[in-house]
Amino acid sequence: MFTSQTSSFQDSIDVEERDDFDSEDIAGYSQKTQLNCYYTIYLYQGTRSEASGENGAWNQRRADSTTSQEDFSLTLIDSSMPSEAEPELRTYISRRLSKGALLGGMGNIATVELSIPEQAVGCYCCLLEQERSPEQPDADGNGYVICFMGGSEKGLNLYPLLELDKYVQGLHSSLQTPELQNLETEVRPYLSRWYEESVMHIHRVVQLVQSNISFLLHAALSHTHVEVTNSDERTVTDVSRFIKAASLQGLSQQDTTAASLCNAISEETQSDLIIDCSTSPPTLSNTVSNRFCDDWTQAFLNAAERCNPFLLGQILENFKLKAIQDMNSLKRYVRQAEMSHYALFRCCQFLQGCGNGDVLLQNARAEHSDMPEACSIISVLEEFLRDQSLVKA
């Protein structure tokens, strides 16, 4: 069963009028400017773990950048934050560690008050633990605490936490010794790219296809495969992540079965959407859209013009929520139509008005594949939509 919190289509598009984004968030998002983003990496050491003489000397040199607690110490390695704000962040992280709120390899997001222009920012924190020595299996583990800051807590939460976790894990092989002799060549450049790699992909996709974004939205909802040709690897990855973020997979109780059936239906009725990047702007082939997806295009373009990926993330989330709400409405009407001709009429009216009938019926057919009466109703509705298309043509 799908869930929804969106009350109306216009409320979904008008992000600035929604309560789930605070007015101070929107105030910063409404200007065409690049948001400040920061990173920080700390060395985490358990007090019972034995450090070598060389590591001990390194720790001594870093004494001014170290916060010590009863059972651990936290030492600054590198940061892009203003110097006056970093000790505040270190105090916050130390408090979280003392409460056991940071689990190894699993990040979390919270709001942090710091002495930076934004004052309150969304902060992602993750503890990367080093493997413990077989000689000291009971010793407190060492590791690194990595923090990414930018936007707001709500803004960062719009991006899958697993993607940020995965990005941090990509640094694991480079974190071998406390001295981090590869800091300038590997670690710092990698950390500096977190915003570009983990947050900006939606913005890059909208900038790439511009008004053709409706075709990608329709492909995501209809389980249509999207192929990117004559492009670099990052663009291919960006488009793939956008399609995954815009799809409804993972939001249904019968997700695996429904998704596989939808894919089968899509393969029978549609060709792959091709994005050929050999031209500028790219050329799209086998394009399919509908009024529902077309209506969201301008909202995406307006948000992309503001150069703020967090607003784009909110719009994409609202797009999905509205699709989910319409899917719930259709399923309710289909159940009622099994017993009432008037409900069937209301169902036809709903499909005609929502502008997303083809996608909703495709998903409904997949989810009701083992219910003959519901499939019969869906067949009638599909015929109704075909007739409406012929009348308009």
Image: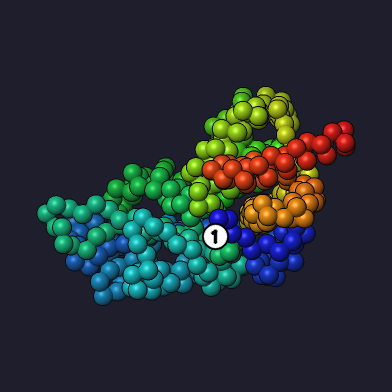
Question: Alpha-carbon neighbours of circle 1 within 10 Å: few (<14), some, or many (≥20)?
Answer: some
Q: Is residue 392 left or right of residue 368?
A: right
> Where does the N terminus fall, quadrant-wise?
bottom right
Q: Is residue 115 left or right of residue 50?
A: right
- Residue 76 in the image: x percent, y percent? 38, 62
Q: Residue furthest left?
A: 135
Residue 324, image quadrant? bottom right
Q: Nearer the viewer, residue 287 or 117?
A: 287
Which residue is rendered at x = 22% and y = 63% of the image?
140
Res. 319 in view: no
Which residue is rendered at x = 62% and y = 24% of the image?
230
Q: How is the image coloured?
A: rainbow
Residue 33, image quadrant? bottom right
Q: Give the vertical position of 101 relative to 141 (above or below).
A: below
Q: How many marks?
A: 1
Residue type highlighted by circle 1: Asn
Res. 108 in view: yes
Which residue corresponds to mark 1?
Answer: 157
Q: Give the vertical position of 242 relative to 265 (above or below).
A: below
- Residue 299 in the image: x percent, y percent? 75, 52
> Where does the C terminus fall, quadrant-wise?
top right
- Residue 122 in the image: x percent, y percent? 54, 64
Q: Give the vertical position of 356 relative to 125 (above or below).
A: above
Q: Is residue 378 left or right of residue 235?
A: right
Q: Is residue 87 left or right of residue 234?
A: left
- Residue 311 in the image: x percent, y percent? 67, 57
Q: Nearer the viewer, residue 286 or 307?
A: 286
Label 1: state its secondary structure: helix
Residue 389, image quadrant? top right
Which residue is rendered at x = 78% and y = 44% of the image?
291
Which residue is rendered at x = 49% and y = 58% of the image?
148
